[in-house]
Structures are given as structure tokens and as C-alpha cells.
Image (tube, grey):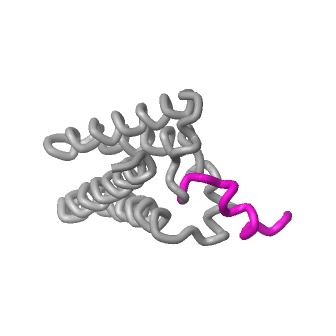
Amino acid sequence: MDKPKIFSALNLGVGAVLGLTGLIKVFSFNLANVFLGLFIILFGLGTIALEREVPSVAVKYASFMFSFLGRGFFYLFMGSLLWSFSGFTSFLGFLVLLVGAGFCAANYVAGLQDYAPRSMRDTDWDDTVDEV
């Protein structure tokens, strides 16, 4: 498996973990957890959707998702949210934290940006962004 596919698989895996954890929280039937679960599902679906096709609005308003450091901090944030829960979701949050730390570290490895998947290379999407 080549390096861009590994990063794409990690992104899809984190999106799936976010979706699964959000579903678990929605079915806790606590009003606060239901709303939090819906937002986590939304972020998980957004993470998965960015691996398929990148709309120009995502490039414009979520440009942090197109670099290792930005996506790493996003995963650290989401992992800390998941880790604050109890049980199995806490373990899943720890896994997302590890992936986020790995993405942050990958930002500082020379030459690794060349192996980023197409969905994480903002230069591929520059022609879709309107000047503001």
C-alpha cells in the first residue's frame, strides 16, 4: 500500500470512528449527548466526504483540513471530545488522538507532504477557490 492510500485510509477510519461514536451518543437518550452525537456524526461524515470529492466551499471555509497540521489539530480536538466520554468511546477517542498526533508530527517530516492524498493537497484545489 502506497503512502497516499495509507493517509486516505486513516482519514476514512477517523471519519468512521466519529460516525460510530456519534451514533452511540445519540442513542444514549440524554438531550445533551444527542446534540453532541449529531455534531460528531456531522464531522465524521464531513471527514469521509472530503476523501471523495472536495467542494469549493470546503476549500474556502475549512482550509485547515488540507494540511497535515490542520487536520492533525482537528483530530486532536475531536479525539479529546471522544476521550471525555466513558467506556468504549473513550478508547476510540484515544485512537483518534493518536492519529491526530501522528498527522501533526507528519507535518514536520521533510518530503512527506508530497505523499499526502489528493484531498489534503490544497494546491490541487486552488483553481476552485474564488478570490475574495
Report the quarter where the C terminus lies: bottom right
Q: Can residue 32 be seen by looking at this rendering?
A: no
Q: In this view, does 122 lie to the left or right of 99?
A: right
| Residue name at image x 57 percent, y 68 percent | 54
Foreground of the two, 43 or 130:
130
| Magenta-colored span | 119-132
**Magenta-drawn stretch, dominant element (helix, strand or loop):** helix
The spot of residue 40 in percent (x, y) is 37, 57
The spot of residue 53 in percent (x, y) is 52, 71
Q: Within the magenta stretch, is there residue 21?
A: no
Q: Is residue 98 left or right of residue 103?
A: left
| Residue name at image x 25 percent, y 55 percent | 21
Q: Report how many numbered discs are placed on residues in the image.
A: 0
| Residue name at image x 45 percent, y 50 percent | 4
Q: In this view, does 98 lie to the left or right of 23?
A: right
- The image quadrant that residue 25 belongs to is bottom left
Q: Is residue 108 left or right of residue 90?
A: right
* Residue situated furthest front in the rendering: 2
Foreground of the two, 103 or 88:
103
Q: Can residue 122 be seen by looking at this rendering?
A: yes
Q: Please, is residue 57 above or below residue 62 in the view?
A: below
* Residue situated furthest right in the rendering: 132
The spot of residue 9 in percent (x, y) is 35, 54
| Residue name at image x 54 percent, y 41 percent | 68
Q: Within the magenta stretch, is there residue 121?
A: yes
The spot of residue 109 in percent (x, y) is 54, 28
- The image quadrant that residue 45 belongs to is bottom left
* Residue situated furthest left in the rendering: 87
